[in-house]
Amino acid sequence: MTDEPLLKISGLETRFFTEEGQVNAVESVDLEIADGEVFGIVGESGSGKSVTALSLLGMVESPGRVTAGEIWYRNADLAAGIAGDVPDAVDGDYVNLQKLPDRVRRTLRGTHFSMVFQDPMSSFNPSLTVGEQIAEAVEAQQRARANPRSVASRTQGYGLGKYLMSFVSSSRKYVTQESRERAVELLEMVGIPDPVLRAEEHPHEYSGGMLQRAMVAQALAGEPDVLIADEPTTALDVTIQAQVLDLLSRIQSETGMTILLITHNLGVVARMCDRVGVMYAGEVVERGTLADVFDSPVHPYTQGLLGSVPEIEGASGRLQPIAGNVPSLLDHEMPDRCYFAERCPKAMEACLTKPAELDVPDQPGHSAACYLATEPFDEATALPADYFDDPGTAARATGVSEDGVPAGDGGELND
């Protein structure tokens, strides 16, 4: 057993290069995730949660690209195996996933990292049975573990010709009987009733909750070290949500795997997570233990998220939703200040300068990218409620005019 984290993410940046301009989807994200813990990333839609997960897996598609940062994964066997071929990617027992060749990075998906996507209906192939698709995942991971170098090259040469031959000769089929039996076991593990029968059914014959369970089964096919669950309860009713969360909790308890849980649902975070990172506009703006973030939130954005959740007791009170919307992530529209300032009820003059991540006093491991982490709110320097409504004032605060031209004095505020 070691106190070293399983994952260390440092300075991760992901950009999308579109016709409208550069979109800064993930901005200098730093995270450490311990072996066997459930770490939650929470935030509004558009805050960069899912892109962070895809960046971790190396699955960001064009026009997106990870442009900076390191992703260190602790695995002594993997480090020893690739040290001779990619020495720059190895540091002791750690491997920098960003330094690995694409063919090697792909072999880690399923065997070491796996993902539960938020829309199982669009993630499964509608023309194949659920059991066949899970069996394919089992077969691919078994081959990867048995012979990783050949699997990295088109799964041992299994191409179109061999696929067509599989319809003619049963001996040429890619998926073995053992993998099909394992698929049934996985369906039973995740609580699918009559798994033998259900394995022969197609995705459209499953309910939403059952299909989400099947996706968890597919993700577990390779017995990964890290399971990324991206909005696993989206579009499910509350009863099915509870069942899926219970399933993930049971699997984590039985296997000891690390879970990275991505959600906008604070109830899910409260039920599942050991530690929490709050994301806004591509940045982690607050992090800490579940008790730190829920009982002693520092960042006004975190406070706003919690204030938007209805309470069972004392339900007569009104909710306090966060005003405004998540800002544009286009690079030329992002101001050089706190991105939340325009929506923040406690915005001060200091917030016109971008804050660093600050440690909260007397709460080890609890930090926030906010001046309020170490200083009290100062009403004397508070910005007027309509401060950002004035285009001229906003231009001076951001350094960019309405026409996209740098403001006259380089963007500093003139009193």
Image (cartoon, rainbow, N blue to C red):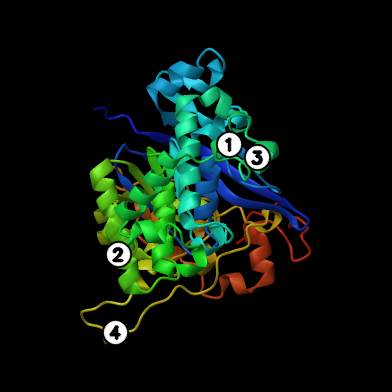
Q: Is residue 137 left or right of residue 320?
A: right
- Mark 1 Cα shell of 10 Å, populated few (<14), some (14-19), many (≥20): some
- The reply to whether callout 2 and callout 3 are in contact (CB within 8 Å) is no
Distance CA(mark 2)–CA(mark 3): 41 Å
Q: Earlier in the sequence, mark 4 or mark 2?
A: 2
Q: Which of marks 1 and 4 is nearer the N terminus?
A: 1
Q: Nearer the viewer, mark 1 or mark 2?
A: 1
Residue found at the very far bottom of the displayed protein: 316
What kind of element bears circle 4?
loop
Residue found at the very far front of the displayed protein: 169
Q: Which of marks 3 and 1 is nearer the N terminus?
A: 3
- Mark 4 Cα shell of 10 Å, populated few (<14), some (14-19), many (≥20): few
Q: Position of residue 237 (x, y in %)?
A: 37, 74
Please give the residue where the numbered disc 3 appears in the rendered image: 165
Residue at 56%, 54% (x, y): give it: 337
The amino acid type found where label 2 is placed reads: Gln
Please give the residue where the numbered disc 4 appears in the rendered image: 317
